[in-house]
Image (cartoon, rainbow, N blue to C red):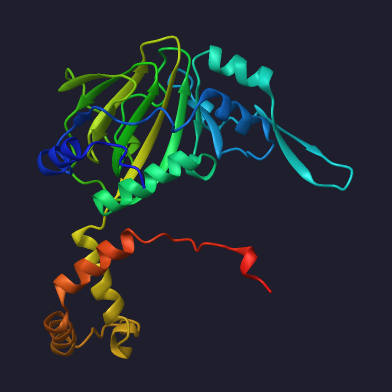
Amino acid sequence: MNNFISHDIMEKFRREHFQKSPFVLTGVDASRLVSWPALNKTLEKDILHYPRVRLANDNWPEMRGYGGFVRYSYSQSGDRTPHINRHQLYKCLREGATLVLDRCQAFFDSVDHMRQWLSSQLECSCSANLYAAFTPTPSFGLHFDNHDVLAVQIEGIKRWTVHKPTYSYPLEHERSFDFIAPTTEPDFIFDVEPGQAIYLPAGYWHNVSTQTRRSLHVSYTIIRPRRLDIFRTLLDELSGNEYIRAPIEFGERLSDDTALRELINEAVKKFDIQLNETMLKIQCNTPAYKHINLELLD
């Protein structure tokens, strides 16, 4: 598998910035990830349903729920097939929308190869979204992600204005829309060019705008196990105990405090934290899907 980022830059990134602070990586081999012809061909294939392919426009928040650029028709055999309506798509893009293709590694092998490489380098599970923009209008406005991000610029220049977290290490269900965004001047401003990638840890507020005639980038989500996951593993072990699974007593009676504490303390004593941390790392970097090889069928 190719090294998409040089060894020296990757080492500096992991040592000084990973899970700590924003960083722009240089010398990224992004030229083979996605081309405009490859993206065009994917949009033409009549395989993309909304919201797998979607639009975002910060000036028109309702655009996030708009799927009218995907039309459906029925074949003679009754199959319902999606089609990208190019006229409606062009109209939306000219008016400031960004085209988003979720989990785009399924359509572009090089994107998937880099995803696998990042997973091995950063001990993480990883997915990829594609963003194509043709105006300076931001997609989502000022927001943070509840996972780390590594955005690889393929064409054009993106300006990232970044604020430090107001809430550290947001969990999977916590969205920036439920928090008050900072109103101060940004802490960082990065102009990311082709062959560069910007890294943001989870919780960093950011807004992104296109500085050139058009922009194409792929953003990798980086999800690593948390210490909280260790406690979830412990809870799974406790769930094997019948007393733990039983309902809390009805009426004025409460649980036997001594018995419950003894069960928990005994489980904690037996729980191997380092072994479970190691297993969580392995599981995080293990593909959730299985390879299929139909040629093996008799």
Q: Position of residue 125 (x, y in %)?
A: 34, 53
View extreme (top): residue = 213
Which residue is more in the foreground, 172 or 116? Answer: 116
Q: Is residue 79 left or right of residue 143?
A: right
Query: In percent of the image, x 41 and y 59: which residue is there?
Result: 287
6 or 53, which is in the foreground?
Answer: 6
Q: Is residue 176 above or below residue 250?
A: above
Q: Return the x and y of residue 223 as percentages of the image width and height.
A: 30, 50
Could you say which quadrant of the image residue 275 lies in?
bottom left
Q: How many marks?
A: 0
Does residue 36 appear anywhere in the picture?
yes
Q: Is residue 70 above or below residue 111?
A: above
Give the residue displayed 61% in from the left and 14% down from the top: 91
Q: Return the residue found at the far right.
A: 76
| Quarter of the picture holding the C terminus | bottom right
Q: Observer-nearest residue: 272 or 236?
A: 272
Q: Quadrant of residue 214?
A: top left
Above-or-below relation of 18 to 275: above
Q: Is residue 228 above or below residue 56?
A: below
Viewer-closest of 103 and 60: 103
Left or right of 28? Residue 66 is right
Horizontally, residue 16 falls left or right of residue 287, namely: left
Return the x and y of residue 167 as percentages of the image width and height.
Answer: 19, 40
Give percent across and percent down for residue 186.
18, 20
Residue 257 falls in which quadrant of the image? bottom left
- Asked whether residue 126 is in view, the answer is no
| Residue in view at x 18 percent, y 83 percent | 267
Residue at the image position 16 percent from the left and 43 percent from the top: 14
